[in-house]
Amino acid sequence: RSRGGFTSKLHCLADALGRPIAFHLTVGEAADCKAYDTLIGLPERDPDALLATHRPPGRPLSLVVFAGDHAPSGSALHTPASAWQVAWASHCLAGLRVGQAAIRAMRPQRHGTLIYLGHHAGVTDAQAVRRLAPGAFSASLAVASAGLRALSQSMARAFGPQRVHVAHVVMDSPLAGDTHPDAIAQACWLLHDQGPTAWTHEMDLRTGRASA
């Protein structure tokens, strides 16, 4: 029993696409941040097994595209610690684990492309982002996107010599916005189709309206 009566709260752990992975039940008045340690400690799906289920039978894994989840809007001053942790986990940690699984599959065959879809907030002036979409600016997303970009650059330096192409695509929003999914897919395929003598390691993808 809580102050509000006989209530309960169901906390959910989700993947980068918002799909539920696990749940944790608490009393209704429990703060969300108190469920973080329990949820983040639950067994995770193995990225190697996840990639294997999306690989055509009998064919090598040649292209993996990763996009982090959304993060709540708000300045650094008004963003709770739990939001910072979730943004980090859904971008940097998830990106690392998916990238590790992709590299393990691609390195032996000396061929493959790993693409990280990032956010402009992580690589551009925060004030410019605020002017374009004042209500959508997220300090936690900016930090997580910058971390994802750094991860991409680190992997590109480490595994480029082993013929694995790692690239970072900067966008207004990888999972929503004005950019059509077909245009995003076309840009990713363009990167994948490049030869090792002239690889692009970062692409800035915007709509014509955003570039004006």
Image: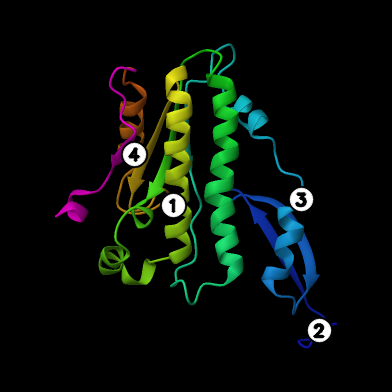
Residue picked out by circle 1: 145
Residue that appears at 68% across and 70% down: 32
**Residue assigned mark 4:** 184
Vertical side of 88 occupied by 192: above or below = above
Residue drawn at x 30%, y 63% as measured from the top left: 129
197 and 209: which is toward the camera? 197
Query: Decide: marks 3, 2 in contact (CB < 8 A)?
Result: no
Region rendered in magenta: 196-212
Instruction: Name which residue lies at 42% across and 59% down.
Output: 142
Q: Of all residues shown, which one is farthest toward the bottom?
A: 3
Badge number at residue 42: 3
Report the disc number at residue 2: 2
Give the foreground label among 3 and 2.
3
| Comparing labels 1 and 3, the label whose residue is closer to the camera | 1
Q: Earlier in the sequence, mark 4 or mark 3?
A: 3
Label 3 SS: loop
Badge 4 vs badge 3, beta-carbon distance below 8 Å = no
Secondary-structure class at tag 2? loop
Q: Is residue 114 visible?
A: no
Residues under numbered marks 4 and 1 in contact, where contact means CB atoms less than 8 Å apart: no
C-alpha span from label 3 to label 2: 26 Å
**N-terminal-most mark, 4 or 1:** 1
Cα separation, mark 4 vs mark 3, equals: 33 Å
**Of the numbered discs in the image, which one, if any, rests on residue 113?**
none
Q: Is residue 164 above or below residue 123?
A: above
Q: Nearer the viewer, mark 1 or mark 2?
A: 1
Question: Could you tell me the amino acid type at mark 4?
Answer: Ile
> For the residue labelled by badge 1, is the local secondary structure a helix, a strand or a loop?
helix
Instruction: Indicate which disc, 1 or 3, sits on the residue closer to the N terminus.
Output: 3
